[in-house]
Amino acid sequence: MSAPIDATSTEAWTALAVRAEDFQPDLRAWFDLDRDRVNKMSLAAGDLHVDLSKNLVDDDLLATLVSLAEQVQLTERRDAMFAGAHINATEDRAVLHTALRKPQGEHLDVDGEDVEVGVHEVLHKMYAFADQVRSGEWTGVTGQRIRTVVNIGIGGSDLGPVMAYEALKPYVHPEIECRFISNIDPTDSAQTVAGLDPATTLFIVASKTFGTLETLTNARLCRTWLLDALRRAGAIGDDDAATADAVAKHFVAVSTALEKVADFGIDPENAFGFWDWVGGRYSVDSAIGTSLCVAIGPERFAEFLDGFHTLDEHFRTTPLAQNVPALMGLINVWYVNFLGAETHAVLPYAQYLHRFPAYLQQLTMESNGKGVRWDGSEVTTDTGEVFWGEPGTNGQHAFYQLIHQGTRLIPADFIAVANPAHPLKDGEIDVHELFLANFFAQTKALAFGKTADEVRAEGTDEATVPARVFTGNRPTTSIMAAELSPAALGQLIALYEHITFTQGVVWGIDSFDQWGVELGKKLAQEVTPAVGGDEAALAAQDRSTQSLIGFYRANRR
Ligand code: F6P
């Protein structure tokens, strides 16, 4: 693996720094002077219409950002990723989520093996399973069909499936509900199984490593809940054979560690594999999406994968100057490294996308929250910004004040679809149009603001004029699709995967490892005995931790 190119030593970086010194964005003037700005900066990526025109960039800046991408060899690294090179340097792995969505019949030889063969074998197995559950052919121990699928997983083994399930609710089988357990807080499993009929419930234990404390603990809690409830109902006996049969009919697993799945008591026949070259946060399109596949069915799941592939092809083949994920990633670099942005808002105007910001938080921040580069050297500039967001219009009545008038620069992505899932009317008024009017109005207000003279012209008392001025020049990207279909969702997710990749390449970091989550996991293991009353373990803790555990122990009933 070649050493990363230090972006800050490139000519393009220097040019950007010079530009940033006296940068006075003026979107009003830029729109007036360049009548073609919107046309030039509105690009298609698959079915997504992406309007970059309200960003704080002009033609020159965009060209310089593209030069930066060339100078850090973005396309070379992109091609290495698609080809299966081990670009995840610290784990010595290929990074091949893009291989999960290649159409059947395509080939990809990696480390001497055609990975597409395995990908499509697992997909077929998953599709057959989904069909069995959806048709009612798969039954629980009492012979009843499955009505609730509970996905047990955390991080990438939860956030993707739950986000996509919520996003695609209109496509969900009417007789099947999915629920999701992730947190080791026992409230999560207790609340999620409350009211469920064990005879019609199927658990999917989703864990890439099958070693994650939260997931295995929750899986055991659910196994106990299932067996106890079935026994109480007289549906199964106490013997080992009855237990094994119940687990086999009510538990399946998704993992790269199939031997650990067997140790848990799940029949390997009922396990769906994937590979170490799929990062957890890039895995919703692998067997980790089994719950989603059961919910929406194989045909829709295949459309979801096609959506990803469409964006992959866009990213892989489109020249950088029209390459939407590359440009969005580069514009983010401009904001983070030159204009001082520390956060980035993602604001879906689509209630069904309400978990999308949470999903993106893992994708972007676990990927690019790094302080060293892929060769172990320190980064030379700031890296990953904080991603956050909530659906509109709720956010408008909460935190938009700060985006409109606060002192910080907060670039924001607005996402909307033309066709609502529920085309309701309030009298004569189309409510989706009311909703989208807010989307259009917000991006307009953020870009063009309101001057003091405009405020005065409304007859505002002079003393309150300053408080009612909107500076404008608050950057947004608008992303629209015709509808929130499985394909559009796949495209949207892949768009952000490649934005994240682009930023990671500029910063020279390995966007595919996540060592930063390990220390806390290890310390939790060391702290656990202290919490349980082991005095020696308690004495080994720092004073603050001892004091907090002391409070816990004194107050625990
Ligand atoms: O702790 C972080 C992490 O490793 C994520 O990257 C991953 O998505 C999550 O935990 C769950 O891991 P697993 O699928 O192996 O249970």
Image (tube, rainbow, N blue to C red):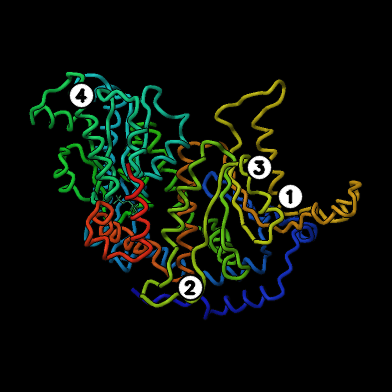
Mark 3 crowd level (few <14, some 14–19, many ≥20, 10 Å Cα) = few
Q: Position of residue 324 (x, y in %)?
A: 55, 56
Q: Nearer the viewer, mark 1 or mark 4?
A: 4
Specify the amino acid type for callout 3.
Answer: His
11 horizontally vs 32: left or right: left
Measured in 3D between alpha carbons, the distance from the residue under mark 4 to the one under mark 3, in whole angstroms, is 47 Å
Q: Quadrant of the N terminus?
A: bottom left
Tell me what residue is drawn at x 66 percent, y 73 percent: 20
Q: Is residue 103 visible?
A: no
**Residue identifier under label 2:** 72
Residues at circles 1 and 3 in contact by the CB criterion of under 8 Å: no
Identify the image quadrant of the C terminus: top left
Residue type at mark 2: give it. Answer: Val
Q: Earlier in the sequence, mark 3 or mark 2?
A: 2
Work out whether mark 4 precedes mark 2 in sequence or the reverse, and give the earlier one.
2
Q: Residue 81, image x and y in percent?
A: 37, 62
- Disc 4 marks which amino acid? Leu
> How much space separates mark 4 and mark 2, taking CA atoms?
59 Å
Q: Give the image location of residue 438, x and y in percent.
A: 69, 40
Residue that protrudes farthest toward the front in the picture: 554
Pointer 4: what residue? 230
Kindly tell me whether residue 525 is visible in this rendering: yes
Identify the residue position indicated by label 1 in the image: 445
Neighbours of disc 4 within 10 Å: few (<14), some (14-19), many (20+): many
**Residue picked out by circle 3:** 397
> Of marks 1 and 3, which one's residue comes earlier in the chain?
3
The Cα atoms of the two marked residues, 1 and 2, are separated by 35 Å
Figure check: 359 above or below 83? above
The answer for how far apart the CA atoms under marks 3 and 2 are is: 41 Å
Amino acid type assigned to the residue bearing label 1 in the image = Ala
Which tag is nearer the camera, tag 1 or tag 3?
Answer: 3
